[in-house]
Amino acid sequence: MIAFLRRGGWVLPALLLWAGAYALLLPAAEALTSRVLGLDLKSHLGSSVAFFLYDAPKVAMLLSLVVFGVTFIQTWIRPEAAREALRGRREGVGTVLAAGLGIVTPFCSCSAVPLFIGFVRAGIPLGVTFSYLIAAPMVNEVALLLLLATFGWKIALLYAATGVTVALLAGWTLGRLNLDPHLEDWVRALPPHAEGGADYRPTLADRLDESRIAVKDILAKVWPYLLLGIGVGALIHGYVPEAFLVKVLGRGAWWSVPLAVLIGIPLYANAATILPVVQALLAKGAALGPVLAFMMAVTGLSLPETILLRKVLKPRLIATFIGVVTCGILAVGFLFLALF
């Protein structure tokens, strides 16, 4: 039995345990909040606590799974080969594919960060990687289906087209700025298997052990930022009132678009969570342009995401990322403001 586990027999039971635990996260968080802590889930404090108890382990589990999978794949493919395959002309194709992958992965901004780390460690160019990071929370099937049901196919299609355009252009722009030196050194370092030499042939057990060690190492580096980011998001989730947003975004003046983005950036929510707020804003008379700009800012740029990314990116790269994406969102907001 011990020999079986050493050869990798632990992987399937571990994955089943992971899936079972992931499915129980939401009811467990709500039960802990209401029954153990005695908090009302509809209160500000109860909503914040339940959000934190659910999202913190969720993001940590996603991070663990993605890093494990990407590291395992890396043991079969040299990082240099992945990097070279996406250079030059093929980088444009990679950017489009990354944005497409983001559309079909319904992650919030913090949940998309684990895949971002995996892409970077695999040697994928930064422009391609950022396209995914922007598209995954901003334009995904959940957001599009909800927009379709709420506003009709024209607005849903235009939102998808403009959102993907922001992801593609922002990724392309960031890729041209040669910002790789502004990744944190531990992210840019080659994974351990690359140091084994050309003749190194790891066994399956070696590859699995290497993946497990990578998960442990990365979690050890990012967990304070993860908890801080989710904590900030939880406070905002529970305490920022919808009535406040309705009041400040209830007009269609030109300045409402940048104001919507400024308000949206510090917030944290996924598309399913923010759409009811969007509906309320529109019902109160807010213009579509600033409201959708607000939605893009909340889902595509968030303070918790920025805090988590700080462990991966140096300040200049974070500032550049936020600046480029903000410009794209402003352009979309003004477009919708002019058309509707």
Image: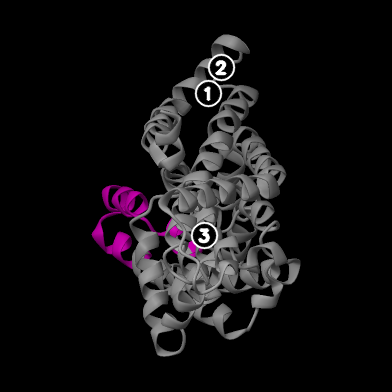
Say which residue appears at 63% left-offset and 41% top-offset.
230
Percent x, y of residue 60: 56, 41
Q: Which residue of the protein is positioned furthest toward the left in this rendering? A: 153
Q: Earlier in the sequence, mark 1 or mark 3?
A: 1
Amino acid type of the residue that numbered disc 3 sits on in the rendered structure: Gly
Q: Which mark is residue 118?
A: 3
Amino acid type of the residue that numbered disc 1 sits on in the rendered structure: Ala
Q: Earlier in the sequence, mark 2 or mark 3?
A: 2
Element type at marker 3?
helix
Residue 36 appears left or right of 291: right
Label 2: how many Cα within 10 Å (few below 14, some 14–19, many 20+):
some
Give the Cα distance between marks 2 and 3. 32 Å
Residue 118 appears left or right of 20: right
- Asked whether the beta carbons under mark 2 and mark 1 sit within 8 Å of each other, the answer is yes
Percent x, y of residue 188: 64, 69
Span highlighted in magenta in the image: 133-159
Say which residue appears at 39% left-offset and 84% top-offset.
90
Q: Which residue is mark 2?
A: 32
Image height of 131 relative to 70, above or below: below
Percent x, y of residue 100: 34, 66
